[in-house]
Image (tube, helix red, strand yellow):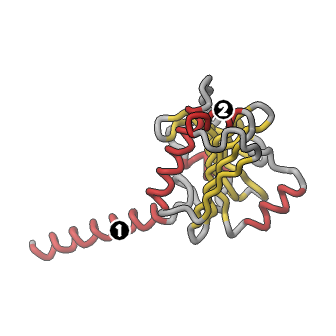
Amino acid sequence: MFRKLFIIAFVVSMSVQAKLSWSENYTFRNTRWGMTAEEVIASELKLDPIGKSENLVKYQTQVLGKNVELVYLFAQNKLIGASYRLDDNYINSEHFVAAYLKFKAALAQKYGPAKKKETNWLNNVYRNRNNKRGLALSLGHVEYLAIWETPDTMINCSLKEDKYYILCSLEYWSKEFAGLHQEVKKENKLDPL
């Protein structure tokens, strides 16, 4: 009897360890770089795509209580990158800065200190006025960027104004497929993030 219980406990513990080690192999959400579009879609159990083409699959979801557009990018039917784009519209641009800082803090908690952090002032009019960060952002006077790196992924968190639209995004790129990403980007085959 004791032997049977021991064997059952051993089998259960091995299956739990296998399951835990399987989840540790994910590089973004429940996916791994190189997966096919079909595998990625199957991994998103609770979401339905809102858009799909040869090179991308889009979803609407939430991250840290913020509405985001989730985009998976493919080249040669391999997952090479993914991103979250803030999909909330704010009248006060300070809210974009707050969302960026929230995303950046969550990434720092998960991956440690950023490898690189930049605040790029393109116009210094509001540089020394913290209460005008949102205005400076909406006028295109400042851009923010933070970069993390894992053994297989480059992660960028950015906030900037582009053509009167404020873009706050988190981008994840496969290091293994970096060459493929550059090649496809050069040929302009991927929809822009």
Q: According to the image, label 2 marks what residue?
A: 135
Label 1 – label 2 distance at C-alpha:
51 Å
- Of the residues shown, which amino acid type is indicated by label 1? Gln
Residue at 70% of width from left, 44% of height from top? 142
Q: Quadrant of residue 75?
A: bottom right
Binning the other alpha carbons within 10 Å of mark 2 as few (below 14), some (14 to 19) or many (20 upward) gives some
Seen from the viewer's position, the closer of residues 182 and 142 is 142
Q: Position of residue 88 (x, y in %)?
A: 60, 29
Position of residue 105 in the picture relative to residue 38 (left or right): left
Position of residue 183 in the picture relative to residue 4 (left or right): right
Secondary structure beneath dot 2 equals helix
Secondary structure beneath dot 1 equals helix
Question: Can residue 117 be seen by looking at this rendering?
Answer: yes
Residue at 62% of width from left, 31% of height from top? 93
Q: According to the image, label 1 marks what residue?
A: 17
Indicate which disc residue 185 carries. Answer: none
Position of residue 136 in the picture relative to residue 24 (left or right): right
Seen from the viewer's position, the closer of residues 62 and 14 is 62
- Of the residues shown, which amino acid type is indicated by label 2? Leu
The C terminus: image quadrant: top right
